[in-house]
Image: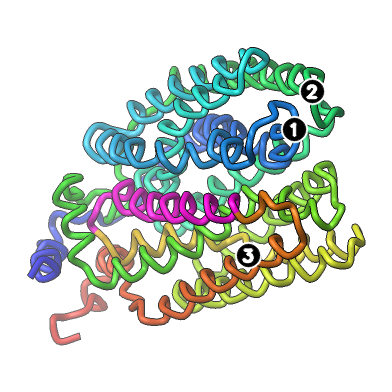
């Protein structure tokens, strides 16, 4: 019933539709401001991914608590953060949402500089940063839809998501230049010095976003952008009533959760194979570096072919296989072999998240982009919280057997999500609505077509 209502609204008279695209040059300013600001929030977490065991030794705390305070806390806070995100972005506007996100992130960055006194200052800072994270992470597809034209959206979304990758590349590589000790007060002081440097950098980057960001361009950049989206509550109800969207949310939420969790537990997974945290940081940096051209190539392919489903299916299969591949190359303990593997996987799987976000916007149109994307990322974070807690408990043993078990669990979960994803239908509703506008009247589809 709900879908038939949507179909009627999408069949509104053509007189309400735009006959041309007017793109604002300021879209590139918005793009840069958002990307730089979002990177600051993502760096909060990525800085500590290679340091899980180091923090455990330095603070003399269980790995489960370290894992919760540095990674899982974002999963817990993601729920209220996503509710806030959906309301601010779909009901008020982009500038308000990013302003709130910037303030929360700055609070979290500066609270962490007291980490030399207690680990719980890290926990408090990450609580604020976790609430702010969906205000950045859930909305690349929203900014693309509001500011960029139909042929630019995949590129814009992909590049903004790749900004997260660049943040990861920088932040997981940097700790080895600050942290040389693996335990004791000296390690804590080194980590605290790193926090201070990044708090200053974050302030310099986030303040311009607060000042110069704008809600929307003077003219909508296309037909779908000019369509008035449903409010957050109605959009969420419609999303949950759409079986196609629900299948996609659950399956891709699970796949992304596994891949997110793999970053969280990289160091304890590699520890039993005598691979140190500096090497783990180098590997994650390599993975991030090659994902930039890989992501852009994926955006080009999908923009030209519109083959969202088949692209996501094969990317998910490769991601599943790569988890077992990570275990196999770990056994070699050969840095060159491991590096080649990470480069290959990083390049091939880079388009997975941006294509997922754009595909969800397509099949859920006209639900607000922040609402649909937020639902996907929220499910990913919830699944990831559960998976990473279980894996942290298993990996606390510090044996190769526990590491192997963790790889097997992730492979099975990612594979299950990939198999069920087959039942998702490729109903590109936004593209259909957009196409009506640009075809000459005699080429526009009739009701019979």
Q: Is residue 244 above or below residue 20?
A: below
- On the rendered image, what quadrant is the C terminus found in? bottom left
What span is colored magenta in the figure?
366-393
Please give the residue where the numbered disc 3 appears in the rendered image: 349
Seen at 18% across and 65% down, the residue is 241
Please give the residue where the numbered disc 1 appears in the rendered image: 57
Gap in Å between the C-alphas at discs 3 and 2? 38 Å
Seen at 28% across and 72% down, the residue is 244
Contact flag, marks 2 and 1 (Cβ < 8 Å):
yes
Q: Earlier in the sequence, mark 2 or mark 1?
A: 1
Magenta stretch prevailing secondary structure = helix
Contact flag, marks 3 and 1 (Cβ < 8 Å):
no
Q: Residues within 10 Å of mark 2 (few under 14, many from 20)?
A: some
Q: Choose between 206 and 241: the one closer to the eye.
A: 241
Q: Earlier in the sequence, mark 3 or mark 1?
A: 1
Q: Choose between 99 and 413: the one closer to the eye.
A: 413
Quarter of the rendering containing residue 35: top right
Tag in front: 3 or 2: 2
Q: Secondary structure at mark 1?
A: helix
Q: Secondary structure at mark 2?
A: helix
Q: Is residue 20 above or below residue 102?
A: below
Q: Is residue 37 above or below residue 368?
A: above
- On the rendered image, what quadrant is the N terminus found in? bottom left
Q: Residues within 10 Å of mark 3 (few under 14, many from 20)?
A: many
Q: Is residue 413 above or below residue 350?
A: below
Q: Secondary structure at mark 3?
A: helix
Gap in Å between the C-alphas at discs 2 and 1? 7 Å
Residue 21, how many percent across, how many down?
35, 51
Please give the residue where the numbered disc 2 appears in the rendered image: 184
Q: Earlier in the sequence, mark 3 or mark 2?
A: 2
Residue 130, how many percent across, how many down?
46, 34
């Amino acid at each position: 019933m709900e879908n038939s209502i949507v179909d009627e609204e999408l069949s509104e008279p053509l007189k309400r539709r735009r006959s041309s695209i007017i793109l604002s040059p300021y879209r590139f300013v918005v793009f840069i401001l958002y990307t730089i600001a979002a990177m600051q929030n993502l760096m909060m977490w990525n800085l500590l991914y290679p340091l899980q065991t180091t923090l455990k030794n330095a603070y003399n705390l269980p790995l489960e608590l370290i894992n919760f305070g540095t990674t899982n806390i974002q999963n817990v806070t993601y729920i209220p953060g996503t509710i806030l995100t959906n309301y601010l972005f779909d009901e008020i506007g982009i500038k308000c949402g990013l302003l709130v996100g910037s303030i929360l992130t700055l609070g979290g960055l500066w609270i962490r500089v007291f980490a030399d006194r207690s680990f719980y200052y890290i926990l408090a800072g990450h609580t604020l940063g976790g609430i702010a994270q969906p205000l950045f992470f859930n909305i690349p597809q929203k900014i693309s839809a509001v500011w960029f034209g139909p042929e630019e959206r995949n590129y814009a979304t992909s590049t903004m998501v790749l900004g997260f990758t660049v943040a990861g590349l920088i932040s997981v590589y940097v700790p080895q230049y600050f942290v040389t000790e693996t335990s004791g007060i000296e390690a804590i002081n080194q980590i605290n010095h790193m926090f201070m440097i990044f708090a200053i950098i974050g302030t310099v980057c986030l303040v311009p976003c607060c000042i110069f960001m704008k809600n929307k361009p003077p003219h909508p950049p296309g037909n779908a952008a000019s369509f008035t989206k449903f409010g957050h509550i109605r959009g969420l109800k419609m999303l949950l009533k759409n079986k196609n969207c629900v299948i996609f949310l659950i399956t891709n939420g699970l796949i992304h959760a596994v891949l997110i969790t793999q970053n969280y537990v990289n160091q304890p997974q590699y520890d039993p194979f005598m691979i140190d945290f500096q090497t783990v940081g180098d590997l994650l940096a390599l993975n991030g570096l090659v994902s930039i051209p890989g992501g852009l190539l994926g955006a080009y392919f999908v923009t030209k072919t519109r083959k969202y489903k088949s692209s996501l299916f094969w990317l998910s299969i490769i991601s599943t296989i790569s988890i077992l591949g990570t275990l196999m190359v770990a056994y070699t303990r050969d840095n060159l072999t491991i590096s080649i593997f990470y480069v290959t996987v990083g390049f091939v799987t880079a388009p997975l998240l941006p294509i997922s976000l754009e595909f969800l916007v397509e099949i859920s149109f006209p639900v607000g982009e922040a609402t649909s994307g937020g639902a996907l990322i929220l499910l990913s974070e919830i699944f990831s919280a559960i998976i990473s807690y279980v894996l942290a408990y298993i990996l606390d043993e510090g044996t190769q057997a526990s590491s192997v078990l963790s790889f097997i669990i992730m492979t099975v979960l990612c594979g299950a999500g990939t198999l069920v994803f087959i039942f998702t239908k490729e109903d590109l509703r936004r593209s259909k609505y957009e196409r009506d506008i640009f075809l000459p009247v005699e080429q526009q589809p009739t009701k019979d077509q």
